[in-house]
Amino acid sequence: MTIKKVSIVVPAYNEETSLKVLVDELNVFLNDFEYDYEVIFVDDGSKDNSFNVLKDAAIENPKFKVVRLRRNFGQSAALLAAIDTSTGDVIVPLDADLQNDPRDIPKLLNLISEGYDLVSGWRKHRQDRALDRKFPSMVANKIISKVSGINLHDYGCSLKAYRKEILSGVRLYGELHRFLPILASWNGAKVAEIAVNHKPRVFGESKYGLSRTYKVVLDLIVLKFLSDFSTKPIYFFGGFSIFSFFAAFAMTSWATYLKIFKGIDLDATPLLIFAAVFVIVSVQLLLMGILADLIMRTYFESQDKKIYQVRESVNVEEKQTANSR
Ligand code: UDP
Ligand code: MG
């Protein structure tokens, strides 16, 4: 598959010193880049001089574009702003802090040309602190792979390449950008992983710490739920509801048996209390499932979202195959 234009997107928050170096590095690298390209920098509400550095770079090189957000919205939002602005058919996010190496980009693009929809970088020799960055990330990557069924070594690496079409309809709430390979793959994308360079951070400081871990876990739970049950949440809640109902039924039967055949009074065991609790839980879960089902319909229908994704079609008019956003 041919690549027409590559959009390199760079979210940046308080990275003025790194950005100066990065702009030079990119200018050199892009000089003999074999594809048409643009670079979209998103200044995510920086409080330092980042925006002016970027503006100067954009004045020098018209292929450098800058989007400045009104305040700090976070890396996912910045990334999405860049993707919305981009005009290329392949998107390559790159960190502003010089930890990624632009010279890895052609390797990623080669795989895209070979037919992959998403190529994910793997920081095989990651240059970050072991205790609070590499170790939690290793555990997280293992869990994410297990839960999602998509095996990557490194979800956290920013340097990736996406065919733009697989991103249509994908919304990045919270910090979901790291889960893009999963979202894309669930949408039917072909995903590959390739080892990339990683350098220690020299200027400025990391915007993240250990506190990111719990968000990753919560995001994963939401994702798993959405993937398995988003079009039919009643199956999830209803399953537990039915289980709960049968538990109540079994306990009531047991209590009745004890009363009739063993002469043990109904209030001599806590069985009936448990049964009552399970009945209430069962009814609540059922109602919750019905509500979730209603909300799901509103979600899909209000945005005219499709519950399927078309890869390609023959002799079918565009309107019928378009993936709605
Ligand atoms: N970033 C951003 N907005 C934020 C936090 C981070 O645009 O609120 C950018 C940051 O400038 C960098 C990239 O996201 O270009 C990755 O952030 P960082 O290097 O702090 O993460 P780490 O590499 O330590 O995981
Ligand atoms: Mg970094």
Image (spheres, helix red, strand yellow):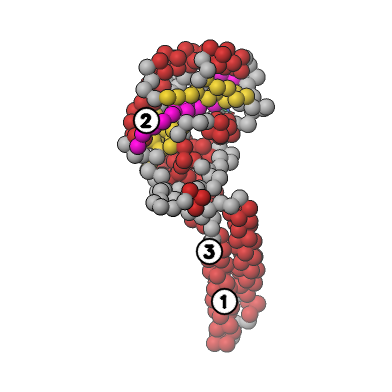
The reply to whether callout 3 and callout 2 are in contact (CB within 8 Å) is no
- Determine whether 206 is above or below 271 in the image: above
The furthest residue to the left? 114
**Quadrant for the N terminus in the image:** top left
Q: Is residue 286 left or right of residue 146?
A: right
What amino acid is found at the position of numbered circle 3 in the picture?
Tyr
Using the numbered discs, state the Cα–Cα distance from disc 2 to disc 1 in whole angstroms.
60 Å
Residue 41 percent location from the top left of the image: 54, 23
As helix, strand or loop, the secondary structure at mark 3 comes to helix
Using the numbered discs, state the Cα–Cα distance from disc 1 to disc 3 in whole angstroms.
21 Å
Residue denoted by label 3: 235
Q: Nearer the viewer, residue 48 or 147?
A: 48
Asked if residue 14 is among those painted magenta in the image, a careful observer would answer yes
Asked if residue 10 is among those painted magenta in the image, a careful observer would answer yes
- Determine whether 36 is above or below 219 in the image: above
Q: Nearer the viewer, residue 78 or 156?
A: 78
Query: Which region is colored magenta?
Result: 1-16
Which residue shows up at 62% across the image and 24% down it?
A: 68
The reply to whether callout 2 and callout 1 are in contact (CB within 8 Å) is no
As helix, strand or loop, the secondary structure at mark 1 comes to helix
The furthest residue to the right? 70
- Determine whether 21 is above or below 254 in the image: above
Q: Is mark 1 within 8 Å of ligand 1?
A: no
